[in-house]
């Protein structure tokens, strides 16, 4: 390893069908495996065998589009992580909990409980949630607009952090002889008066062995980047090209520094979907097979709804017109993602159909197709040239995609000297090489 202070970080992005849009249709995938406890355990153990920092479950309190090719269900992630906690010893356990459709105290308690029960292996992905359809699940109020969601989220994160840090490390005495269980002077109230929350709370979970659970963040907007720079131990991002990833990396690290934090204490983790084959042709054939399973009409609707790129009236076998790109960039909630996708489409001369397939394959994240050696070289390039501190690895299908990566790519990363050969820490914060918060 050229820089002995840096080590590649890998989270497993937990979508147990696979992270390709059509994974659930692949003949090697059981579409009911998400609800199989033995399958979940096997997959977590494979990730731990691969020495991953953590398994991470993205989540939202909604079903998604109720249509023939959509509406795939999945377990509530905190419940699932509680199961996986019992069968792993080092693997970090992280999940999204929405700051728009949850409450700070309950969220802090859930994640802190998981953290304490696993001796410091828990993390929380704090996101606002962009799916407007979620609002109807919680009442008559409309989905808050973008700026208001981040305003609420800022207060939410501040409260959760304050609750986690409200117990001093030695507050619990638990002396059976004297009958003293805790020192009341070391358990502090958390008063907060904001626009969205007014509380005067006393937290009921002791301090974590890792100081506090890790905070992840996922936001490519200006609001999201700045909030992540203030609070996140690591930020998740979707960058379809290495050039876009480098630009994001530089911008985010600058924001971390401007927020008065050490840029080395806020990792950048793009999503990375690798389709691996023993030969490049074999890998490409696997990717093509998956793409052929995509419901193109459903995919067009999803990209229009999610990214704001609507190609429904476009000839799918021709490039997307500049005017449509410009309209989408001007109106999309995920402007930076659409800009990067446009760059990719222009450079690779993609047709509208190929743009949709590429975007939907990994939900806007980077896709690499090749041999284990090519994948390892590409990961090293991102890691060593200012594009990433690590990745959310997105297996195209489960279980095969993960097992191939662990058995054939991980050893090559270890041989390059950029990835651990054994766990040397017991907490998630330790895996990331981050200091314990005061």
Image (tube, rainbow, N blue to C red):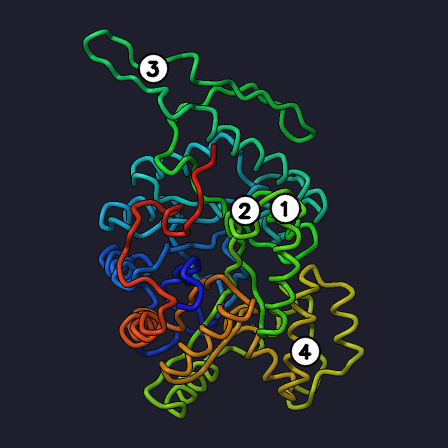
Q: Which residue is mark 3?
A: 182
Let me know if residue 61 appears in the view: no
Residue underneath mark 1: 227
How crowded is the residue under tag 3: few (<14 C-alpha within 10 Å), some, or many (20+)? some
Q: Earlier in the sequence, mark 1 or mark 4?
A: 1
* Residue at image mark 2: 232
Q: Which residue is mark 4?
A: 343
Is label 4 or label 3 in front?
A: 3
Earlier-in-chain disc, 3 versus 1:
3
* Left or right for 83, reference 381: left
- Can you give x and y, in whole percent of width and height, for residue 287 in the image? 44, 83
| Mark-to-mark CA distance, 2 and 3 | 31 Å
| Residue 194 visible within the image | yes
**Element marked by disc 4:** helix
Q: Nearer the viewer, mark 2 or mark 4?
A: 2
Residue 12 occupies quadrant: bottom left
Quadrant including the N terminus:
bottom left
Callout 1: SS = helix
Tell me where residue 254 sits by quadrant: bottom right
The reply, left or right, for residue 395 in relation to residue 310 is: left
* x 37%, y 13%: residue: 183
Q: Is residue 429 left or right of 44 when viewed as pictured?
A: right
Label 1 to label 4: alpha-carbon separation:
26 Å
Q: Circles 2 and 1: CB distance less than 8 Å?
A: yes
Badge 2 local density, few (<14 within 10 Å), some, or many (20+)? many
Where is 110 relative to 245, above or below? above
């Amino acid at each position: 390893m050229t820089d002995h202070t840096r080590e590649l970080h890998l989270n497993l992005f937990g979508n147990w069908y696979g992270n390709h849009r059509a994974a659930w249709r692949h003949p090697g995938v059981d579409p009911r495996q998400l609800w199989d406890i033995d399958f979940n355990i096997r997959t977590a153990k494979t990730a731990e065998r691969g020495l991953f920092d953590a398994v991470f479950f993205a989540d939202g309190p909604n079903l998604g589009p109720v249509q023939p090719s959509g509406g795939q269900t999945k377990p509530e992630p905190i419940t699932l992580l509680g199961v996986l906690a019992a069968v792993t010893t080092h693997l970090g356990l992280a999940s999204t909990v929405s700051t728009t459709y949850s409450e700070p105290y309950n969220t802090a308690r859930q994640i802190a409980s998981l953290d304490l029960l696993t001796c410091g292996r828990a993390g929380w992905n704090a996101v606002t949630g962009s799916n407007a359809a979620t609002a109807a699940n919680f009442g008559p109020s409309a989905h808050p607009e973008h700026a208001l969601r981040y305003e609420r989220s800022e207060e939410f994160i501040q409260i959760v952090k304050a609750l986690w840090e409200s117990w001093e490390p030695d507050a619990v005495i638990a002396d059976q002889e004297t009958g003293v269980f805790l020192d009341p002077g070391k358990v502090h109230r958390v008063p907060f008066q904001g626009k969205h929350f007014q509380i005067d709370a006393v937290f009921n979970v002791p301090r974590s062995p890792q100081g506090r659970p890790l905070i992840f963040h996922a936001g490519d907007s200006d609001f999201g980047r700045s909030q992540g720079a203030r609070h996140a131990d690591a930020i998740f991002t979707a960058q379809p090209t290495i050039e876009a990833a480098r630009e994001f990396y530089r911008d985010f690290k600058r924001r971390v520094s401007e927020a008065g934090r050490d840029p080395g204490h806020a990792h950048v983790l793009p999503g990375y979907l690798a389709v691996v084959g023993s030969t490049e042709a074999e890998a490409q054939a696997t990717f093509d097979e998956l793409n052929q399973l995509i419901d193109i009409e459903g995919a067009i609707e999803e990209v229009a709804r999610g990214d704001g790129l609507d190609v429904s009236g476009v000839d799918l076998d021709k490039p997307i017109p500049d005017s449509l790109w410009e309209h989408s960039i001007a109106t999309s909630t995920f402007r930076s993602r659409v800009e990067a996708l446009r760059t990719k489409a222009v450079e690779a001369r993609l047709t509208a159909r190929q743009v949709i397939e590429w975007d939907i394959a990994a939900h806007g994240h980077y896709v690499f197709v090749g041999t284990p050696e090519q994948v390892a070289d590409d990961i090293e390039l991102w890691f060593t040239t200012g594009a990433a501190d690590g990745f959310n690895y997105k297996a195209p299908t489960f279980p095969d995609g993960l097992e191939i990566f662990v058995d054939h790519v991980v050893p090559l990363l270890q041989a390059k000297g950029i990835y651990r050969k054994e766990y040397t820490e017991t907490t998630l914060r330790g895996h990331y090489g981050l200091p314990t918060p005061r």
